[in-house]
Amino acid sequence: MIILGIVLLVIGFIAAIPVIWSIGVIVLIIGLVFMIFGALGHAIGGRRHVF
């Protein structure tokens, strides 16, 4: 999700489409939250590991 967020940020910035840029920011933040929770050992959505 982090990579997808970065890709959407770049596409939204280059194409000057604010909606795609905003979605990229949201996806990037969600990916970072998942990464932090996973590193701390918390289950996300009932799963211990997210692949």
Image: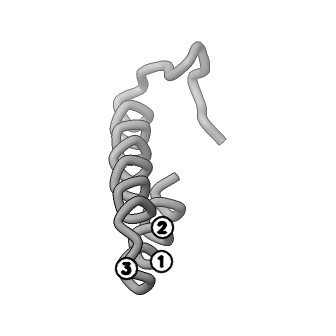
Using the image, determine if residue 49 lies above or below residue 11: above
Q: Mark 1 = which residue? A: 11
Measuring 37% from the left and 79% from the top, which residue is drawn there? 16
User: Please, what is the three-letter code of the amino acid marked with disc 1?
Assistant: Ile
- Numbered mark located on residue 8 in the image: 2
Measuring 35% from the left and 30% from the top, which residue is drawn there? 40
Give the CA separation, mark 1 to mark 2. 5 Å
Circle 3 residues within 10 Å: few <14, some 14–19, many ≥20: few
Q: Are marks 1 and 2 in contact (CB under 8 Å)?
A: yes
Q: Earlier in the sequence, mark 2 or mark 3?
A: 2
**Tag 2's secondary structure?**
helix
Is 44 left or right of 33, judged from the image as shown? right
Q: Mark 3 = which residue? A: 16
**Tag 1's secondary structure?**
helix
User: Please, what is the three-letter code of the amino acid marked with disc 2?
Assistant: Leu
Q: Are marks 1 and 3 in contact (CB under 8 Å)?
A: no
Measuring 61% from the left and 20% from the top, which residue is drawn there? 47
Circle 2 residues within 10 Å: few <14, some 14–19, many ≥20: many
In the image, 25 versus 39, the foreground residue is 25
In the image, 5 versus 15, the foreground residue is 15
Q: Earlier in the sequence, mark 1 or mark 3?
A: 1
User: Please, what is the three-letter code of the amino acid marked with disc 3?
Assistant: Ala
Measuring 43% from the left and 46% from the top, which residue is drawn there? 31
